[in-house]
Amino acid sequence: MGPLRIGIGEVRVADGDTRLVTYGIGSCVAIILYDSVGKIGGFAHCLLPFGDGPELKYPRNAINAMVKMMLDKGARRKDLIAKIIGGATMFEGFERHGIGKRNVLQSRKILEELGIPIVAEDVFGNHGRSVEFSLETGEVRIRSYRHGEKII
């Protein structure tokens, strides 16, 4: 089976030999949670650092929903780890808005509040990224036109 795609403002939780993928992460942030014991993972693609309403395009809502979905699927809270990707400044002149940076900082803050350790990041810069998460191995493969490929 091919990878399951996560769009902006979406959260997916899966297990087994599933691969979760998103394309074109710029100022958005991809937040990945993983229980390596149960091989249960979650992937959120967040657009904005803050907002009103229940949408999953905000890190707080997305992370809380993802944790609940993972625990419902059998993950254990004490085994959860996180990886964060994105938060770039894609266009000159947009630095003052700092949406990418604020997305990352807000994601870090929420994960810290929940006691979920961030074990790897690929954040900031001025380039887009595509992200593929393998639940079988826990590897996160990041591809960028400017920076090639890396695994975290």
Image (tube, helix red, strand yellow):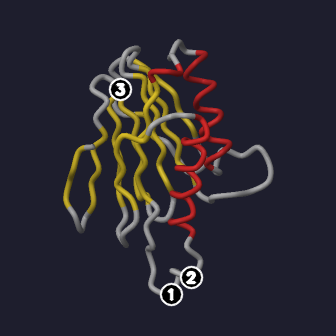
How many angstroms separate mark 3 from mark 1 (CA)? Answer: 38 Å
Instruction: Farthest residue to the right: give it.
Output: 53
Q: Residue at x 38, y 19 (%)?
A: 39
Which residue is the site of mark 2? 96
The structure residue drawn at horizontal position 22% and vertical position 64%, both measured from the top left corner, is 147
CB contact under 8 Å: marks 1 and 2 = yes
Residue that numbered label 1 is attached to: 93
Numbered mark located on residue 23 in the image: none
Question: Disc 1 versus disc 2: distance between alpha carbons?
Answer: 7 Å
Give neighbour class at mark 2: few <14, some 14-19, many 20+ (Cα, 10 Å). few
For the N terminus, which image quadrant? Answer: top left
Where residue 19 sits, quadrant-wise, is top left
**Which SS class for mark 2?**
loop
Q: Amino acid at mark 2?
A: Arg
Q: Amino acid at mark 1?
A: Gly
> Which residue type does callout 3 highlight?
Leu
- Crowdedness of circle 1 by 10 Å Cα count: few (<14), some, many (20+)? few
- Please name which of the two marks, 1 or 2, marks the residue nearer to the observer: 2
Residue 28 in the image: state x and y as whole percent.
51, 59
Whole-number angstrom distance, CA of label 2 to CA of label 3: 37 Å
Label 2 or label 3, whichever lies nearer to me, is 2
Q: Is residue 68 left or right of residue 42?
A: right
Answer with the quarter of the image where residue 5 lies. Answer: top left
Tell me, for residue 135, which label it has, or none.
3
Circle 3 packing at 10 Å, graded few (<14), some (14-19), many (20+), is many
Q: Is residue 141 above or below residue 27?
A: above
How far across and how far down the image is residue 73, in percent? 55, 15
Q: Quadrant of the C terminus?
A: top left
Left or right of 8 in this view: 141: left
Tell me residue 106's x, y (percent). Answer: 59, 55
Label 3 element class:
loop
Mark 1 residue element: loop
